[in-house]
Every structure is written in structure tokens, then in C-alpha cells.
Amino acid sequence: MTDSTRGIEDLRSRLLDEHVHLATLCQRVVATFEEGDREACDATFRELERSLEEHLTFEERELLPALAHVNRPEADAILEEHRKIRSRITDLGVHVDLHAARASAVKQLVLDLGTHARREGEILYRWAGEAFDEPTRRNWMRSLRVW
């Protein structure tokens, strides 16, 4: 494997790792909810909310504008998915605040985030790894969280 190929795979892996972390947070929200620990549920949900927003913002700032130059329909579709995810997180947050959240809603969010992650992994992350130069990828790697 060349250094360039390794850099492409490292970036893709790091971005996919963020999706795994987000799914883990969703599962922790479900667990704390089912245990009846509303305080822990709220804290974990806020962590999910914050982490998800950072992840979506990174993609929208760094990746999607460039993707739009070569594949506008795909970039627009991913942006629309982001809009829907944000809307669901906002709605779910209200229910968490009111202690009226249903575990099934969070479980469905986990499934939907998985579908979204697969799409991004196959299209956005693969393309980004190949489209940007090594210094840009390294800079992004430094800015992405390590879970």
C-alpha cells in the first residue's frame, strides 16, 4: 500500500469511525432511557447532539461544496439527509427534555444513521480521499476527533 493509498483509507476510516461513535452514543441514550436514568439520558443525548452537529458541519464545510462541483445531485441528496437528521435530533431532544422519548425512536435513528453512513462511505468519503491532496487530508485528520 502506498502512502497516498494509506492516507485515503485513513481519512475514510476516521470519518466512518465517527459514524460508529455516533451510533454508540445513540445506543447509550437508549440504554440510559431504558434504565430510567433520565439525567444520564439527557447528558448522553446532549453529547450525541453536539458530536453529530460537529460531524455534519465538518462535512458541509469541507467536503460537500467540492463534491457539488463534480456531482451536484449527490451533494444535494446528502445535504437533504443532513437536514432530516438535524430535524429528527431536534424533535428527539424535545422529547428527551420532556422525558417523553421512546426507545424505538432512538433505535430507528441508529438504523437511519447506519444507512446514511454507508452512503457517505461509498460515495462521499471514497471520493474525498481521492479528490484532495495529501496535505489537505492530513490537516483534516488532525481536526477530526479520535474516539
Image: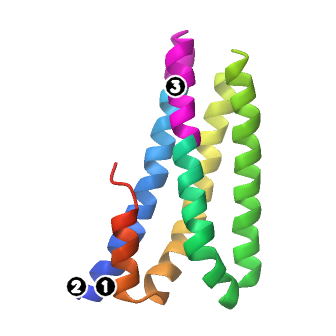
Q: Which residues are magenta?
A: 30-49
Q: Which residue is mark 2?
A: 1
Cβ–Cβ under 8 Å for marks 2 and 1:
yes
Q: Amino acid at mark 3?
A: Ala
Q: Amino acid at mark 1?
A: Thr
Tag of residue 5: 1
Q: Position of residue 114 (x, y in %)?
A: 56, 51
Helix, strand or loop under label 2: loop
3 vs 2, front mark: 3
Q: Quadrant of residue 108?
A: top right
Helix, strand or loop under label 1: helix
Q: Quadrant of residue 117?
A: bottom right
Left or right position of 113 against 135: right
Q: Residue at x 51, y 68 (%)?
A: 121
Answer with mark 1 or mark 3, whichever residue precedes in sequence. 1
CA neighbours of label 3 inside 10 A, class few (<14), some (14 to 19), many (20+): few
